[in-house]
Image (cartoon, rainbow, N blue to C red):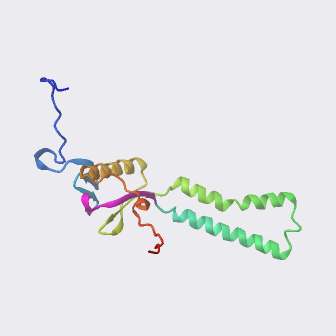
């Protein structure tokens, strides 16, 4: 149904005012336009980025080391008690205390993840090489940047995220002719 007084909305251009690329996200050190994604001194053309996906970074090394050291020390104490026959002379309360002490490494690892959670990471492929594009421990900032990169890819007609497992070639056995 087309009426004479109806107005049409112009198509949104990928270019902003004066032919400049349209800005999608800008904060100190991070700029996303429809053409480029820049973090610090590194810049990528959005059209060259493929297989974008997000992950979580590694756990805090200090917390992992503290958990590992405490597990080794507590395990050593348990082994020495076992070999010296000290476990047979322990009371029920001592066994409960020993069981509680064995929880220390688990609690240290959980506390480390709580105080210093793993960073959010945006990965992508460029020229067949997988690269870390962006990393942040701020979930809100990471979400804003990743959405801006997705919008930039969509403006190029490339779609948003690609599932790396869905695009991987699956091995199939050869069938006889």
Is residue 152 shown in magenta? no
Name the image quarter holding residue 109: bottom right
Residue sitting nearer the eye, 94 or 47: 47
In depth, the one of 131 and 156 nearer the eye is 156
Q: Quadrant of the C terminus?
A: bottom left
| Residue in the picture at 41% in, 65% down | 168
Residue 75, visible in the rendered structure = yes
Q: Nearer the viewer, residue 119 or 147?
A: 147
- Please report the residue visible at 22 percent of the width from the left and 55 percent of the height from the top: 35
Residue 101: % across, % down = 73, 61
Residue 119 lies in quadrant: bottom left
Please name whichever residue, 83 or 129, is drawn nearer the observer in this view of the structure.
129
In the image, 17: left or right of 98?
left
> Can you give x and y, in whole percent of width and height, for residue 63 in the image?
56, 62
Is 84 above or below relative to 13?
below
Image quadrant where one finds the N terminus: top left
The part of the chain drawn in magenta is 41-56
Q: Please tell me whether residue 46 belongs to the stretch shown in magenta.
A: yes
Residue 44 on image: x %, y %:
26, 62
- How many marks overall? 0
Residue in the picture at 76% in, 60% down? 99
């Amino acid at each position: 149904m087309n009426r004479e007084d109806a107005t049409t909305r112009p198509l949104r251009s990928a270019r902003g005012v004066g032919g400049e690329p349209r800005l999608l996200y800008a904060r100190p050190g991070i700029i996303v336009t429809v053409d480029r994604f820049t973090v610090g001194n590194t810049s990528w053309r959005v059209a060259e980025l493929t297989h974008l996906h997000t992950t979580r970074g590694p756990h805090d090394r200090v917390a992992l080391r503290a958990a590992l050291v405490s597990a080794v020390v507590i395990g050593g104490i348990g082994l020495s008690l076992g070999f010296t026959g000290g476990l047979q002379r322990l009371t029920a309360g001592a066994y409960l205390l020993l069981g509680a002490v064995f929880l220390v490494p688990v609690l240290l690892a959980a506390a480390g993840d709580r105080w210093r959670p793993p960073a959010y990471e945006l990965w992508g492929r460029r020229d067949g090489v997988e690269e870390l594009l962006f990393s942040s421990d701020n979930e809100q900032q990471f979400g804003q940047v990743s959405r801006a990169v997705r919008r930039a890819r969509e403006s190029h007609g490339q779609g948003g995220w690609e599932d790396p497992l869905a695009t991987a070639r699956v091995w199939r056995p050869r069938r006889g002719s």
